[in-house]
Amino acid sequence: MNPRLTNLSRSRSGNSRARGTTLLEVMAGLAILGSLLVSILVAKGRCAHQWSLANRRLEAAVAADTLLSDWWRGTEEFPREATGQLSSGMDWKTRKIKSIKANDLDVEVVRLELFDTRAAGTVTAQPLVAVDVVLPKETLSAR
């Protein structure tokens, strides 16, 4: 008998397990790839959400700067306890902040907060931007 043929037939029958892939190994590989794909998609979704929120906060900072620039022209007209809505879909609110140190200096602290209403249609609990402004106290005639 030809020794070459004998070795060839032995290698095919004896090493078939080493050369091929079992169904279990294929399924395990697919499970690993699937979980990797899901984790990548979740990370991409979170990144997109954070990117959107960062852009919205940047818009709110620009809007707050515009509001403060308009109001700063006349401090007696600066709204100390008021609310309003911007055309960009944000709501703003001003309120006085109690401060003992500000009272000692005869000034008051007014906080401007901008809220996002465009996304959900309602004001969110956390403001996108909050700015504290120190103003001279209102006189009785200005109230």
Image (tube, rainbow, N blue to C red):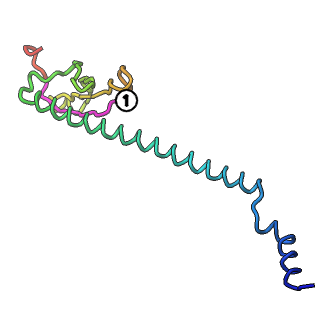
User: Residue 22: x and y, percent?
Assistant: 77, 58
> Which residue appears at 76% of the width and 64% of the height?
20
Whether 130 is among the magenta residues is yes
- The residue at 77%/54% (across/down) is 24
Nearest the viewer among 135 and 103 is 135
Q: Quadrant of residue 127?
A: top left
Along the viewing direction, whichever of 142 and 118 lies nearer the viewer: 118
Asked whether, in this view, residue 71 is left or right of residue 5, the answer is: left
Left or right for 39, reference 59: right
Please provide the residue range marked out in magenta.
126-137
Amino acid type of the residue tagged 1 in the rendering: Gln
Numbered disc 1: secondary structure? loop
- Residue marked by disc 1: 126
Name which quarter of the figure residue 106 lies in: top left
Q: Residue at x 87, y 75 (%)?
A: 10
* Residue 5 part of the magenta-drawn span: no
**Can you give x and y, in whole percent of width and height, for residue 49 in the image?**
41, 39
Camera-side residue of 12 and 110: 12
